[in-house]
Amino acid sequence: MAEEKKSLGDFLVERGIIHPDQLKKAYQEQKRGGERLEQTLVRLGYAEEAQVLQGLADYFSLPFIDLNTYSIDEKVIQLIPEEMARRHTLMPLFKIGNTLTVAMVNPLNIFAVDEVRNKTKCDVEIAISTTEKIKRALDQYYGFSAASLENNLQEFVRGPKAESSPQTIDYRKTYDLSPAGKDSLLSPADDVPASRMFDIIMMQAIRDRASDIHLEPEERALRVRFRIDGLLYEFLTLSKQLHPPLLSCIKILAEMDIAETRLPQDGNFNVKIDDRSYEVRVSTFPTIYGENGVLRILDQNTALRKLEDLGFTDDMLTRYKQLLQRPNGILLVTGPTGSGKTSTLYASLNLINSVEKNIITVEDPVEYRLGLIRQTQVNPKAGITFASGLRSILRQDPDVIMVGEIRDLETSEVAIQAALTGHLVLSTLHTNDAPEAITRLLDIGVQPYLISSSVIGVLAQRLVRKLCPECKSPHPVDPSGDPGLVEMLNRYSPDWKPPITLYRGKGCKNCKQSGYWGRMGIFEFFQVDERIKRLIAERASTQQVRDTARENLGMVSLREDGLYKVLKGITTLEEVNRVASQTSFLA
C-alpha cells in the first residue's frame, strides 16, 4: 500500500522550519482567518516567507528561485498583461516551445494558472518566489504604471502608521528614499496619498534617468511627464483631485508659499536615493487649469564627469585641453539651452582644478558643488550680477574664473579685462555655431581689437542621444540622398560602395523601447590664431571666419562631427539631423 503523503505542515516541521506547537497554533489561527497555511506562519512570525516558500517548493517538487539574480527573458513580458500579473502576483520568466514558466507565490492558485493559459495559449509551468521579489520584478520590467501606483498607494494607506516621529521639512536636509531608507519626503501627518505618490514619482524619475519632472494640470486630469535624454515622455495620468495636495507637498519641501497659486515661484530641496544625492529645483507657473510644476533633477555626481566622457574626438580633445592650460584668455562654449554647455564647463574645471590654483565662479544658479572651487551665484536683489560678481572676483586673487554666461556689454568688458590682466576666463554664449560667437560679441558692442586680443578659442556643441547598446542593430542605407554623408564617406573611406551599414535601436526594456540610452556631445571647435585675429579686426563676416577656420585650422562642423559618430555606430542620422540640421555641413 502506498505511503500516504505528509501534510504541508508536517513537512515543514520535519524540515525544521517550524515547531510542532507552532504548527498547532497556526492551524487554529488559519481556521479563523481563512488564510493559506504559509501566510499564517509568516504573519505570526514563526518563519520568514522565503523559508516557508522554500519548503513549499520542496513539498510540491517545484523550483524556488531568487528573482534578484534571475535573468528574465524580456520577450515573455509582452505575453502577460501587467494588470493580470499584478492581480495574481506572478512574474513570467521564460518560454520554451509552447511552455511558459511563471514565478508565483501560491502554486495552488488554479484560477491564475487557467487565466494565464487562456491568455497566452501556452502550457504553464510554475516556479516559486517571494512576494517582495515578484513585486520588485514587476516594477523593474513593467515599470510604475498607473495600476502599480494605485497598488502602492492603497498599501500605503492601509499599512501601519510610521513609528518614527514626524520629520521637520527642510530643503537643506537630505531625504533618503532608497529602499533601505526610512524617510518619506513628507511626515506621516501630511497628506498621505499625495506624499506617497510624490515619493513614487521621484523614485521612478531617478530610475528612468529623468532630468525633469513635469506636472501638468489639464481640465480633468493631471499629466506627469519625464524628460529623458532631452525628450519628454508621458509617465502617467492622475486624477485632478491629486493636483492640489501634490503641489502643496512639493511647495512645502521647497519652502515655497503654498497659499500663493497666482504667481510663479521657485524653490529647491535635496533628496537621497540609493546612496546618490540629488538637488531638485522647483518652478511653478499659473495656468488656466492650475499651477504647472517643473522639477529639475541635478545629480551631484554628474559634476565629477571628465572631458573624455563627453564625446570629444581625440584630436579635438587634445587641442581643447591645450587651451585650458593657457594662463590667460577667454575660452567660450556656445550652444542653445540644454546643449550641455554647463557640463562641459564643469568638466573643464575638474581638469585644471588643483591646490595650486584659485578658481572662482559666478553662476546663475550654481548647479553642482566642486571641491577647492569658490562658487557664487547671481542674486540681483542683493546686487550680485555677472558683471558686479566678476569685478569682486578680480579682487580675490583668482587664477581661473568661470562666468555662467556673457549676456551684455558690461559683463563682456569685465571678462575681457580679466583675460587681459592674466586670468583664464571660461564662459558661455547662445549662438548656433562657433564662428557666430565672434559676431555675437561684436553685436553687443565689444570692440574688435578687444575680442582679438582676449578670445583664445570657441567650442560649439549639441547633445545627441546614443544608441542603446542592448538593442542596436545594423541596417543597410543608401547615402546618396545626403551630400554631407557622401562627403564624409569620400573623406574617410574613398573606396566605399552603396549600400553602407549604419545602426539603429530596435527598442528594448533597457531603453524603454526608445532605441536610445544616454547622450553625448557633438562639437565644433576652433582656436583663434593670427589669421582669425586679422579677420576680427576687419569685422569680417561669420562666413569668412568659418571658411578660414575650416581651411586653415581644420575646424570640424557640428554636423560633420555628428556624421562621424553616425558612421561609428554611436548615434543615428535622425539624431544628428534633429539637433544640427540648421548648421551647415560645409562652409
Image: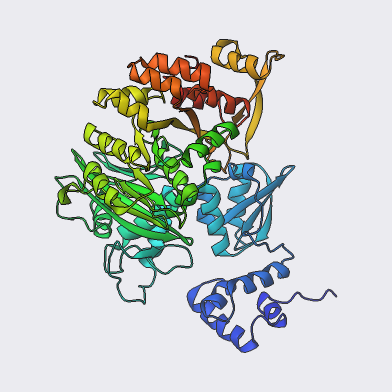
Relative image position of residue 321 (x, y in whole percent): 52, 39
Up-down relation of residue 253 to residue 215 (above or below): below
**For this view, does 143 lie left or right of residue 424?**
right
Can you give x and y, in whole percent of width and height, for residue 200 in the image? 40, 55
Q: In this orientation, does residue 477 appear?
A: no
Whether residue 522 sits left or right of residue 405 in the image: it is right
The vertical placement of 186 against 214, above or below, is below
Image position of 87 (left or right of 190): right
Q: Nearer the viewer, residue 489 or 52?
A: 489
Q: Quadrant of residue 469?
A: top right
The residue at the point 16 percent across, 48 percent down is 383
Of all residues shown, which one is farthest toward the front? 421
Q: How many marks?
A: 0
Q: Position of residue 229 (x, y in %)?
A: 46, 38
Hey, which residue is sitting farthest right in the picture? 1
| Horizontal relation, residue 74 to residue 403: left or right | right
Q: Position of residue 292 (x, y in %)?
A: 25, 43
Q: Is residue 37 above or below residue 191?
A: below
Q: Residue at x 39, y 53 (%)?
A: 358
Q: Residue at x 54, y 42 (%)?
A: 309
Q: Quadrant of the N terminus?
A: bottom right
